[in-house]
Image (tube, rainbow, N blue to C red):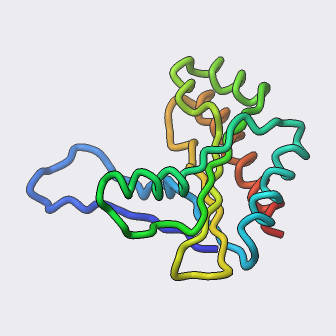
Amino acid sequence: MKTTLVLLMLTGLIALPFRIEAAAPVVVVQSAKGKFDEVRDRVVMAIENRGMVLNYTARVGNMLERTGKDLGRTRQIYNQADVLEFCSARLSRDTMEADAHNIVYCPYSIAVYTLPKEPGTVYVSHRRLATGGADRSAKALGAVDKLLDDIVREALK
């Protein structure tokens, strides 16, 4: 499992009156050996195994390929890339009851993609949502993070 964390460092020109703590990664990226379609189907199955329905599949790889031509850009970013969108009625309700502004986190999404220079490796990634906020909101978003982690873990085992 690969996880990338980017930290910004201050130059020391400004004295800060508060403590800076290390942040959790904003994006979780994992990989598996296999075929794109098989890994994507396992992610869909892991979502459905929890009683949820896939709302939408964004064909991001196809979109970038199509629009790249219009923009005069020829570099292939992905061999294949889909973003799977879905929601949990219970977790979404908990999250938005905790803070109505949490609407921006719904629907949840998991990206499945392959890179041109890495044949046979399929990446599965998702955003980390529980990055702070009020206790009740952080707890609700933490439950969504656990759901996303569990789905990816099931799909990649």
The residue sitting at 76% across, 64% down in the picture is: 37
Task: Give residue 61's position: percent from left, percent from top.
Answer: 54, 57
Question: Vertical placement of 24 versus 32: above or below?
Answer: above
Q: Is residue 129 left or right of residue 23?
A: right
Question: Vertical placement of 113 versus 142: above or below?
Answer: below
Q: Is residue 87 left or right of residue 24?
A: right
Question: Vertical placement of 65 versus 51: above or below?
Answer: below
The residue sitting at 56% across, 24% down in the picture is: 103
The residue sitting at 71% across, 74% down in the picture is: 32
The residue sitting at 71% across, 21% down in the picture is: 93
Q: Nearer the viewer, residue 15 or 70?
A: 70
Q: Is residue 8 left or right of residue 87?
A: left
Question: Vertical placement of 83 versus 95: above or below?
Answer: below
Q: Nearer the viewer, residue 44 or 152?
A: 44
Task: Give residue 1's position: percent from left, percent from top.
Answer: 64, 74
Task: Give residue 64's position: percent from left, percent from top.
Answer: 46, 54
Q: Nearer the viewer, residue 41 or 14?
A: 41
Task: Give residue 9's position: percent from left, percent from top.
Answer: 25, 62
Q: Quadrant of the C terminus?
A: bottom right
- Residue most extreme to the left: 13
Q: Nearer the viewer, residue 115 or 2?
A: 115
- Quarter of image, res 31: bottom right
